[in-house]
Structures are given as structure tokens and as C-alpha cells.
């Protein structure tokens, strides 16, 4: 059984925000909610990097630990999902999550939170797969259609990888091997080729 | 030794010199480090390490997605909040509240109800004004709603889900959360009200109050300590309720209005302070409920009719009784001495 994971390659992300847009469009997400966002560190300075981030589908998810109504569950694919019928919009998952993944549409008075919304790894929710009900609450269930998350599929530079953890790490490991790591990544070798280093990136 | 014969002074110098050389030899292996620090020819900072270390601790970036904290990639403060809530708050508050309840159950079984000494005299003195009673019951009703709904949010997952099922409990929790959010605003009105109407009686008189506490209020045997209109225990409850209430109101309002865009860390801190204050006030609330209903005879009426039996006053609040004993009237007739609405048979 696959263990689904996201990985964003900060050396490749160009902050085009296509993943954000693709996600919003695919799932018809309302105003004010963004299941995915691109964060740029050191914007305009040397060493600037961008990373696309959404729910990371943690193995020991903090949101699930603190939820007072216990609405989270993990699928066989390792995707962390939640039941919007049970969610009460208390915001505890938002306090606990390190990635700022849980989002709350402001549906009621005084900024009181509505039902939580977050990245589903394009895997829908507890309703029947690909049903209209599921689509309305959680967006499209691409996993049930045999497809991977759209954000990763859309990514022009293939910075964002999403899928089975083993495959994702294979791809990334290969990249790292050819690229060299850390300080060497943007050094002499990148520009002028180094002896014995293959230049054609297979992924 | 020869050098010692020549002069002690010279001997001392030789020894000092030897010590210096010896210590230099000992320090010798460290010199390359000091040297390398200053004269390292190649400095290869690893951009990755520094970048990701900073990122992990909520270093601020920027994002095209505008909103609260969206520029923060990773913020691990939530972990401390989670551990506080799951590993400390939930178990320890359960021990504290359960402990208080058990102590009073035990006390009740051993000591029983505290009766009026010599029975009721049939003459009453006014204990509370009508405004005090209205304020009391207003805050009491608001607080009980907030306490119960708060407890549902705190323990519901472990206590109520097994009873009601996930869907059933979700409904309960939804109602609890909404009530807590809205009724909480009334508490902001209630706390200042409580502060104002009881402040005159709740001012601390150090000598009398300290002695009351030293004697344990007379609850654990021994003679009944002297007490004014409110004893030290009641004053402590007043100040816990008022100060705890202020803390609850301030942190509660921060949590109640996420539309002011306070970030996660403010919310986490407010939430921790809010729950600690809530548990402390609730524990004291249990004490208050026990002593004013089941635990003691003749006291509950102070908050319904507003008057108490003169023998009860004499037994528990002797200093106050000495001041007002002339105003005691037979139970059947309304007092003229005290303020009129308070002594009439007003509903609480």
C-alpha cells in the first residue's frame, strides 16, 4: 500500500503559484480559503527560496490529537482527512498545526469559524467516492479516479512532488545525487559541468 | 633541594615558571581551534542548514496568499500548545476537580452537614441586598453555562463520545461551542458587576482574615475563628472569581474574535491562560456550591430571601453579628430596619 507524501523541492520552486490556483479551481474552494500556499523565504535577498506548502498528511497528526470532537482519520494511503459533519469549527487544529494547513471560511457572525477546510491530497472525504456530496464538501476525489493531486501534476518545474512516498524519495534522491547538495548546488559545476557528472536530469 | 637553600623567593619563582609552562603544555592541543576560528581560509556556509533551521522556528517569509500567518512556513509552537493541552491540562485538571469533589464527599461523610448551633432562633437579619442577589444569580447562571460548555469541550472527546457516539457528540459540542462563544460576552458584563456589588464586604482585613485561614475556618475542628460579614474563605472566592473572571474575559475575547487577525501564537497563549484560569475558578466554584447548599444549614437563603437566621450569623460571622444584632426581626414579619426590597419575600 502506498504512503502518500508531498515534497517541494526548494531549488526548483519558482513561486509561480500555479499549484495554489490549480487547487482552488479543481476543488472550487471559496473566497478566503487557500488549501495550498507558496511561502517565499528571504524574498529579494541572496539565498531566496520558495516552498509550496499545504497539509503534509502527518503520520502522527497534531490536528487529530487535539480535535475535541475527534473528526480526523487517516486513510489506508496515509492521507489525513476529516469529517465536516462532525467538525465544529473550534480552531484547535489551526493552533496545533505547524504548517498552517487548516482553514476556516468566515461563514458566521463576528468572525466565528465555519467548518474547517484543508488539503485532502485530492482524496475527498468520508462520503461515497466521487459523489456530488463529497465534491461539494471536500472537492474532487482524484485519487479515486487513479490520479495524483493536481497541484503536483500541474507544477511546471516539477518542484512539487506528490504521490507514493517511496517514488517521491527515489526521484528526489536522484536529483540530489546529480545536483550536489547544499553549497555546491549553485556552484561552478552547475554552470560549467564537472567531470564525471551527468548533466541530463532524468526526472 | 638546593634552590631552597639559596632563597625561598627564587624557589617560588621557579615553581611559578614551571606551573606556567605546564599549563601552556596542557592548553597546547586547543590552540589550533583558536587559530582556525580566526584564520580559516575557506568559509563555506551551508545555505540549506541555516535557512531550514530558521524556517522551522516560524521565521517570517512572504506569500502571495494573504491572511493571518500565511508568510510563516513552519511554526512549531503548536507542539507546546498541544503538549500542554493533552499531557497537562486534561489530566491535571481532572485530578484537581475530581480531587476537590472527593474531598468534599469525604468531608460530608465524616462531618455531615454543618448545623446551626442551638437551632434557628426564628429571628432573621438581612445578609444581602437585592442588587447583590441579582448580580449573584446573573453571574451564577452565566458562569454555570460557560463552565458546563467548557467542560464539554475539554473532556467530551473522552467522556461523551463513548456515550453519545461521534455524530451525537458533534451536535452537543456544536451547541456547547456556540453557547460558550455567545454567553461568554455576558460574562464580560457580569464580572465588573460582581466586583462592584461585593467589594465593600470583600476588602481584606489582614489580622482577622489571616487568623481565619490559620484556623482553617473552623472546618477541621477547633473553635470557630472570628469573622466579619465575609470570612477569609469567602473573600478568597470573591477575589478568585473577580481576578480569574477578568483573565477569562480578556483571553476569552481574544479567542472569541478571530476576525481581528491575531496570530496563532497569541491564540495559543490566550487559550492556555484561559483554560488554567477556568480550571482554578471551577475548582473554587465546587467549594462554593458545596458550602452554600449541601454542606451548611441556613446559608442558602442568604441568596434567595436575602436574610439569615441570627443564630447562624452569630455562629459564622460573629463580628458582623455584633454590628447588626439589633436589627434582627422575627422571621414572619418583614424588617423595616434594613432596605425594604431585600427583606420582602422577593424571588431570587
Image (spheres, rainbow, N blue to C red):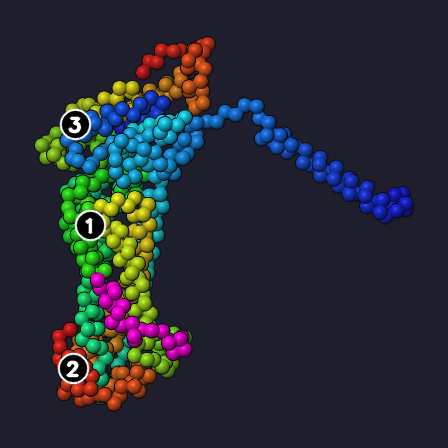
Q: Is residue A111 magenta?
A: no
Residue corresponding to mark 3: A26
Horizontal arrangement in the rendering, residue B19 relative to residue A200 (left or right): right
Label 3 resides on the chain identified as A
Question: Residue at coordinates 26% horizontally, 44% vertically from top-left?
Answer: B261
Q: Residue B200, located in which quarter of the rendered image?
A: bottom left
Tell which tag, 1 or 2, sits nearer the viewer.
2
Label 2 resides on the chain identified as B
Q: Separation of disc 2 and disc 3 at Cα?
A: 72 Å
Expressed as whole percent of the image width and height from the top left, the position of residue A116 reads 20, 41
Q: Residue furthest front?
A: A44
Quadrant where the N terminus of chain B lies? top right
Say which of B225 and B184 sits in front: B184
Residue corresponding to mark 1: B161
Residue corresponding to mark 2: B340
Label 1 resides on the chain identified as B
Would residue B215 be visible to someone looking at this image?
Answer: no
Q: Is residue B201 magenta?
A: yes
Question: Residue at coordinates 27% horizontally, 28% vertically from top-left?
Answer: A4
Total residue callouts:
3
Expressed as whole percent of the image width and height from the top left, the position of residue B227 reads 34, 80
Q: Is residue B30 above or below residue A153?
A: below
Mark found first going from the N terminus, 1 or 2: 1
Q: Which residues are magenta?
A: B189-210
Horizontal arrangement in the rendering, residue B48 relative to residue A96 (left or right): right
The kind of secondary structure the magenta stretch mainly shows is helix
Amino acid at each position: 500500500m502506498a504512503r502518500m507524501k508531498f515534497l517541494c523541492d526548494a531549488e526548483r520552486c519558482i513561486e509561480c503559484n500555479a499549484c495554489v490556483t490549480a487547487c482552488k479551481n479543481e476543488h472550487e474552494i471559496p473566497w478566503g480559503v487557500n488549501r495550498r500556499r507558496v511561502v517565499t523565504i528571504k524574498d529579494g535577498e541572496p539565498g531566496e527560496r520558495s516552498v509550496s506548502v499545504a497539509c503534509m498528511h502527518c503520520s502522527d497528526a497534531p490536528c487529530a490529537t487535539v480535535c475535541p470532537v475527534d473528526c480526523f482519520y487517516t486513510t489506508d494511503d496515509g492521507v489525513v482527512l476529516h469529517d465536516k459533519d462532525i467538525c465544529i469549527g473550534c480552531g484547535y487544529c489551526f493552533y496545533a498545526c505547524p504548517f498552517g494547513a487548516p482553514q476556516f471560511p468566515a461563514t458566521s457572525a463576528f468572525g466565528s469559524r465555519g467548518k474547517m477546510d484543508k488539503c485532502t491530497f485530492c482524496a475527498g472525504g468520508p462520503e461515497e467516492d466521487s459523489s456530488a456530496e463529497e465534491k461539494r464538501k471536500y472537492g474532487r476525489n482524484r485519487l479515486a479516479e487513479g490520479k495524483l493531486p493536481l497541484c503536483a501534476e500541474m507544477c511546471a518545474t516539477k518542484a512539487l512532488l506528490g504521490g507514493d512516498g517511496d517514488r517521491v524519495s527515489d526521484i528526489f534522491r536522484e536529483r540530489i545525487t546529480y545536483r550536489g547538495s547544499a553549497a555546491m548546488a549553485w556552484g561552478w559545476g552547475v554552470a560549467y559541468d564537472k567531470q564525471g557528472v551527468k548533466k541530463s536530469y532524468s526526472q | 633541594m638546593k634552590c631552597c637553600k639559596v632563597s625561598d623567593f627564587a624557589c617560588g619563582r621557579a615553581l611559578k615558571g614551571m606551573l606556567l609552562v605546564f599549563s601552556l603544555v596542557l592548553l597546547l592541543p586547543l590552540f589550533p581551534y583558536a587559530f582556525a576560528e580566526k584564520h580559516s581560509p575557506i568559509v563555506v556556509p551551508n545555505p540549506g542548514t541555516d535557512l531550514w533551521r530558521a524556517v522551522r522556528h516560524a521565521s517570517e517569509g512572504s506569500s502571495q496568499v494573504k491572511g493571518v500567518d500565511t508568510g510563516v512556513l513552519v511554526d512549531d509552537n503548536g507542539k507546546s500548545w498541544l503538549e500542554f493541552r493533552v499531557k497537562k491540562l486534561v489530566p491535571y485538571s481532572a485530578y484537581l476537580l475530581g480531587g476537590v469533589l472527593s474531598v468534599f464527599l469525604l468531608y460530608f461523610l465524616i462531618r455531615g452537614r454543618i448545623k446551626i448551633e442551638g437551632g434557628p432562633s426564628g429571628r432573621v437579619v438581612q445578609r444581602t441586598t437585592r442588587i447583590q442577589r441579582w448580580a449573584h444569580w446573573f453571574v451564577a447562571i452565566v458562569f454555570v453555562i460557560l463552565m458546563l460548555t467548557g467542560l464539554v469541550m475539554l473532556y467530551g472527546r473522552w467522556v461523551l463520545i463513548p456515550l453519545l457516539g461521534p455524530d451525537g457528540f458533534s451536535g452537543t459540542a456544536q451547541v456547547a461551542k456556540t453557547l460558550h462563544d455567545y454567553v461568554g460576552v455576558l460574562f464580560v458584563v457580569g464580572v465588573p458587576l460582581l466586583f462592584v456589588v461585593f467589594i465593600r464586604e470583600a476588602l481584606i482585613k489582614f489580622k482577622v482574615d489571616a487568623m481565619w485561614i490559620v484556623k482553617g475556618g473552623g472546618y477541621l475542628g477547633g473553635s470557630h475563628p472570628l469573622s466579619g460579614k465575609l470570612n477569609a474563605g469567602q473573600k478568597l472566592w470573591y477575589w478568585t472569581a473577580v481576578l480569574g473572571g477578568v483573565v477569562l474575559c480578556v483571553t476569552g475575547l481574544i479567542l472569541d474574535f478571530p476576525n481581528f487577525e491575531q496570530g496563532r501564537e497569541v491564540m495559543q497563549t490566550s487559550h492556555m491562560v484561559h483554560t488554567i484560569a477556568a480550571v482554578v475558578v471551577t475548582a473554587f466554584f465546587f467549594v462554593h456550591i458545596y458550602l452554600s447548599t449541601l454542606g451548611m444549614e441556613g446559608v442558602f437563603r442568604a441568596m434567595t430571601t436575602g436574610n439569615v437566621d441570627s443564630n447562624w450569623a452569630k455562629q459564622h460571622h460573629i463580628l458582623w453579628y455584633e454590628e447588626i444584632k439589633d436589627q434582627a426581626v422575627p422571621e414572619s414579619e418583614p424588617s423595616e430596619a434594613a432596605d425594604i426590597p431585600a427583606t420582602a419575600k422577593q424571588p431570587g
